[in-house]
Image: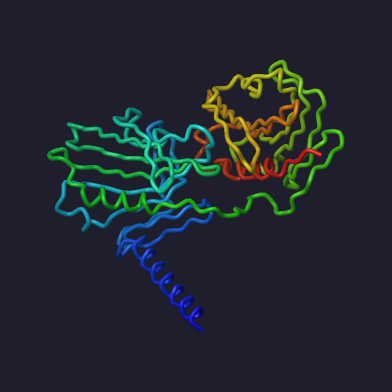
Amino acid sequence: MKNILLLLFALIITVILNININSQDMPAGWKEYINLDNGFSVKYPADFTLDETYKITYSGGMTHKNGVFFKPPESFINGTNILDAYFAVEWMPRVNDCFAENFLVIDDYFEREHIDTLNGVLYNVIENTVRNDTEKKQYYEKIYSTEAGIYCFALRYYLITSSAAEHEKAKMDSVFNNMLTAFTIISVNKGYDFKPDWKQYKSKKYAFNIDYPSELMIDETDSSVFNGKFRVNLSFNVPDNIMKGSNLYNSFISVEKLLKDTITSYDYLIRMTYLHNTKYVTENGQKYIVLEGSEGGMSHFYYELIYAADYGKYCYVFRLYYDGVSTGVFEPGVVLQYDELSLLRVFKRMRESFRLK
């Protein structure tokens, strides 16, 4: 009986402690925004306006729409020299180049860059201030970016103030710091935009199995040559009916087999593309070298994402490739932007299903 009472007492104390901890996690009067589709949550003041449809133009001229926007009420900035302000969580579907400068709005030049760790999450951080004497305004942004899964996330803090005085932004700093602390990556099982009836490709000839969406068209080629290197190549082509109405011209996912002692990183690339940063990752115990290449001109673009892994004397290359044309050359609404996130999700699921026989 005594042991039972002690156990009950311990359970009660544990519950009380958990309640106290949870109540401290959420600032008074704040709400929690949970985005299961893209795998994150963040907390924000209850009187802030939430907008999941906003668009933002980055300094490079690209309009981006993957984001959620938190805007303070007028009463929050009344009596200060703040003319406009907002906070945002944004994400890009990229594996490499997850740097805060990719999310800059004000200008390509930034003043300060550093690395910071919060709650075990590593962030690339930049701050930027631009003074416009003609407008008598000062523009300020602070961006924290971090990589998680197939996304590069950014938390943005943006201000426009009168340049007549220093920023009166202590309250804004406090809100942003709390949002940063409360930002959480959620591990979720995402759905895929292709049909759910996936198949498994099995072949004695290639000696591996891999899952793929039933809509993809299989193309087996024994003697393909890229960059002068012979490779066994199996491609899964995205059919025209899926790309129809979008700005994609061509897209495929391939599995390629090469003798690993004859190749360099550049031999993985199909085109003479611009090679972004090379990195090394481990997924489900398998080590990969990851490359990302792109090329563009005259409104056309080309993109490839490559995961390469050693399996004995061979190197297997998993490639996502697509090319198309900018939607800007068409009348608005005539051609839709391709669904890059869907392609990346399918690519990830296929890569993870790969098994050697």
Say if 92 sits above or below 291 in the image. below
Q: Quadrant of residue 247?
A: top right
- Nearest the viewer among 207 and 230 is 207
In the rendered image, the residue lying farthest to the front is 2
Q: Horizontally, is 95 left or right of 199 in the view?
A: left
Direction left: furthest residue: 164
Q: Residue at x 35, y 57 (%)?
A: 44
Q: Could you say which is closer to the camera, residue 109 or residue 324?
A: 109
Residue 88 visible in rendering: yes
Residue 291: image location, x then y, percent? 58, 29
Residue reaching furthest to the right: 204
- How many numbered marks, from 0 up? 0
Q: Is residue 244 visible?
A: no
Left or right: residue 21 compared with residue 326: left
Above or below, 16 relative to 348: below
Q: Position of residue 211 (x, y in %)?
A: 74, 45
Q: Residue at x 29, y 34 (%)?
A: 128
Q: Nearer the viewer, residue 69 or 249?
A: 69
Residue nearer the viewer, 242 or 170: 170
Quadrant location of the C terminus in the rendered image? top right
Horizontal side of residue 5 vs 214, given as left or right: left
Q: Is residue 236 left or right of residue 61?
A: right
Residue 236 drawn at (x, y percent): 74, 37
In the image, farthest residue toward the top: 228
Q: How is the image coloured?
A: rainbow
Residue drawn at x 33%, y 49% as measured from the top left:
87
Rendering coords of residue 196 (x, y %): 70, 54
